Amino acid sequence: MNLVATDGRGRLTMASTHIGDPSDIPQRSLDALRHADLLIFEEDRPARSFLKAAGVHRDYLRYSEHDQKHTLAECEAALKKGQWVAYMSDQGTPGLADPGRDLVSIAYRLGAKVQVIPGPSSLTAAIAACPFDCWAFHYLGFLPQEPGRRLTALRAAAGMTRPMVIMDTPYRLKHLLGSCQQAFGASRRAFLALDITGASEEFLSGNLAELVRHAEKLGTKLNFVLIIDGA
C-alpha cells in the first residue's frame, strides 16, 4: 500500500506503537518511520528504540514542553509543502494522553490528509480484561496532580453510573488509589491493569480497599489503567 499522498496535499500519519511487548508494533508504523519526510516523537529514548526496530537511523523532531513551539512550526511548514509527517507517541495509539492532538488540529486547518495506523491501546486492552460491563464508560484520563484537586475531581465523579477509566504516571498509583477510596468508598468495585503486555503484566479485580492493600506491595514503575465501576 502506498502511504505517500499523491494529490499534492500534505499528510499526517498518527502511527501506533507497542505498549509493552516490542513485537506488537505494527508493520505499517515501521514503514512510516522508514519513509515519511518528517518524524516526530515525544522523547529521545523511545524514538531511538523505534528507529532501531525500523532498521533506520534518521533525524527527528521531539515534541516536549520545551520543543513544542518549534515542532509545531516545522510540522506546519512540512504539511504546507505537501510532505508526509509521521507522529508516534511513547506508547500505544496516539491521541489520548499525548501531544498528538495539536498536530491533528494543524493538519485539518491546512486541509492536509490525516491517516491513522491503528495498533495497541492500553485503554481497550484494559477494557478487554475487565470483569465488569464497560459497554459505555467515562474516560477521566489524567486527573490533577495536586491531592486536593484530584480528590475534588473524583468526588464530582462519584455519582456516575457508568465505569470510569483513569490513567496516570506509575509513581502516583498508590496516591491515586487512596484518593479513589476516599471519594468512592472502600467497597466500590474496581479493576487494575498493570504493565499490559509487559513482563510484569497483572490484572487485579476487587474492591478499592483490596486494591489499596495490594498496591503497597507493588513497585513504582509499572504503567497502569484503573477502572472504577459505576455507582
Image: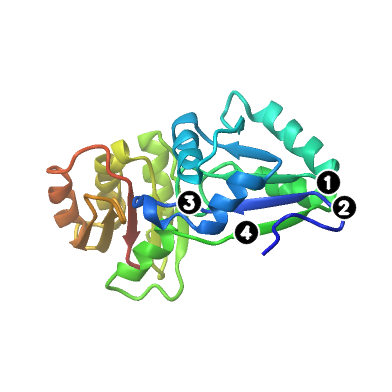
Question: In x, y percent, where is residue 199?
Answer: 23, 50
Q: Which residue is mark 4?
A: 116
Asked if the residue under mark 1 is in contact with the one under mark 4, i.e. CB atoms within 8 Å, the reply is no
Q: Dot 4 lies on which element?
A: strand
Which comes before the other along the chain, label 3 or label 4?
A: 3
Asked if the residue under mark 1 is in contact with the one under mark 2, i.e. CB atoms within 8 Å, the reply is yes
How far, Cα to Cα, is label 2 from label 1? 5 Å
Which comes before the other along the chain, label 2 or label 3?
A: 2
Question: Which quadrant of the rendered structure holds the C terminus?
Answer: bottom left
How far, Cα to Cα, is label 3 from label 1? 25 Å
Question: In x, y percent, where is residue 147?
Answer: 35, 36
How far, Cα to Cα, is label 2 from label 4? 19 Å
How far, Cα to Cα, is label 3 from label 4? 12 Å
Of residue 150 and residue 76, the one placed in the foreground of this image is: 76
- In the image, what residue type sits under mark 2? Gly
Q: Which residue is mark 3?
A: 17
The residue at 53%/52% (across/down) is 96
Q: Dot 1 lies on which element?
A: loop
Q: Which residue is mark 1?
A: 82
Left or right of residue 37, residue 194 in this image: left
Q: Dot 2 lies on which element?
A: loop
Q: Which callout, 4 or 1, points to the residue nearer the camera?
A: 1
- Quadrant of residue 144 in the image? top left
Which comes before the other along the chain, label 3 or label 1?
A: 3
How far, Cα to Cα, is label 2 from label 3? 27 Å
The residue at 50%/32% (across/down) is 43
Question: Tag count in the figure?
Answer: 4
Of residue 53 and residue 151, the one placed in the foreground of this image is: 53
Q: How is the image coloured?
A: rainbow
Report the disc number at residue 8: 2
The residue at 87%/52% (across/down) is 8
